[in-house]
Amino acid sequence: MRALAVLVVIVTACGAPAPTASSDAGRDGGTLVVGWQEPGTLNPLYTTGAQTSALVSAITLEGLLGVDPDGAFVPALSESVPTVENGGVVLDGAGGMAVRYLLRGGVRWSDGAPFTSADVRFTWELILRDPKVTTRDGYDQIDALETPDERTVILRYRRIYVPYLSRFPAILPRHALDGVADVARADFSRVPIGTGPFRVVENVAGDHLTAERNPHYRVPGRPRLGRVIIRFIGSIDAALAQLKAGETHVAPSVGEAEAADLAAAGMTLVTATSPIVEAVAFNLARPGAEPDQPHPVLADRAVRRALVQATPKALIAASLLRGTVIPGRSEIPIGPLAAGLTQDEHDPAAARRALDLAGWRVGPDGIRAKGGTRASLRLVGTTGNRTREQVQQVLVDAWRDVGIEATIRNVPPSVLTGSWASGGVRQRGDFDALIAQLGLGTTGDVDPHAYLARRHRCDAIPRTSNGGAGANYERFCDPRVDRLLDAAGKTPSIQGRREAYVQVLRILNEEAIAIWLYDRMRIDALRPEVAGHAANPWAQTTWDVAEWYLRR
């Protein structure tokens, strides 16, 4: 059966093969096809489109730790999770901390080279020296990384760094990248070498990626599949059509609006409550400029709060999403940090009064202006997302009703989430208002500290001087937020940090840096023959790809 499976998945000039019952029906072996967006890079150190890239790179790359469906850290390339309680973390009298990882023995890269502590050290040094990496947060707090032997890594932090467990989610191979002048543009970014269950054997731009079983994978008897093909699909509608037609096996992270239709078509839905919120983020700086130049319209908090009040979130949730979601309240929609937080309710009349008081006067065409500046915004989203396009139209009508004009400008996902070097719209701030997914689930960070610091500290604003590092896309800078996060960063206990995080989230709501439209569900749609997949709201769909198989 395995030999037959290999024969029928040979890619021809026509592109990636479709699933076939005769070849892929075995419990072990066979080929599974996933429909997904084409990632800009498979090197996780350089991607800003975390979801787009990580779903693919997760099948081949691993980190020191992983995250289980309960949001708990679990061992991956490390043998255990270091804590103060088990002696893996030691706090010193000078206010620093040492974290010791014992690496699994006998692990090999997919090309057969041994995995050692030198790979962890190389990854850290690369992050520190390469200005193109997406973030150095946390890694730059490590004074020294010691490797006393091939299986031991000791991280010496100059001060307490509370989200230490979320660092090193992917380790890169030293033997393959050491000496490469521009790692971001290396072949590795398209065909990576990893320690995960599969190895990429080809990546055809605009068409598909093929990964086959990693013969050196550390878990005996895994993965169960022989191959995984990622078919690059430009729109959600096309992805769902191919799934229902049997051309693919899996459509990850489908929208809530499509769930009922997919279930009626016989698809299996694997669902979980998500730590992601669908949001409209406001750019507080002039689009495309350095962040010290305020936005001519959105720098005014009165305008931002009026837009929140003008947005019919309950109508969007009930009508467009068929009641499968609830209106958003906070950037972190689930868990204790979301408790008690609210955002301004839908109240167009209050929005009009606030705009009047702020000096934004209605012109002859119904659009407001102040000091010669017209209240006109570009609302940017992704192409091929029907639900978002419908939401955008609701927003255009609702905002115009209070005197604010919005024009829709959608771009491909790879353009929206592209890196600073590639001119990514989000990273460069080339938008007024941006409809996108935000929240812990978009980055893989389970500890809220790393996420909030990367999203909302003043020094996390992408700019020329930091090479575009950071994810503060709103260009929002508030010393109160920095102080609260600084205080939380000195408190090892998550419960001790909770109130500081709640205050940060409350400030974000008061300042109306974004509209939290609705809390997202994690929904993966599978053909009935696909088995072995469990929902994990804290990880990408492919987090357990080693366990997937095709039923007989």
Image (cartoon, rainbow, N blue to C red):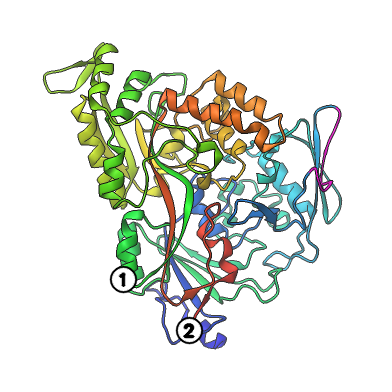
Q: Position of residue 549 (x, y in %)?
A: 53, 76
Highlighted range, magenta: 84-93
Name the residue rendered at 31%, 55% in the picture. Answer: 257
| Nearer to me, 177 or 419 | 419
Q: Is residue 220 above or below residue 151?
A: below
Residue 469 seen from this side: no
Which residue in the protein does label 2 denote? Answer: 25
- Could you tell me which residue is drawn at 76 percent across and 47 percent down? 121
First in sequence: mark 2 vs mark 1: 2
Q: Main secondary structure of the magenta part?
A: loop
Task: Name the one closer to the observer, 219 or 263.
Answer: 263
- Residue 86 highlighted magenta (yes or no): yes
342 left or right, relative to 167: left
Which image quarter: residue 29? bottom right
Residue at the limit of the structure toward the right, as seen here: 148
- On the image, the x and y values in percent for residue 345 come to 33, 30
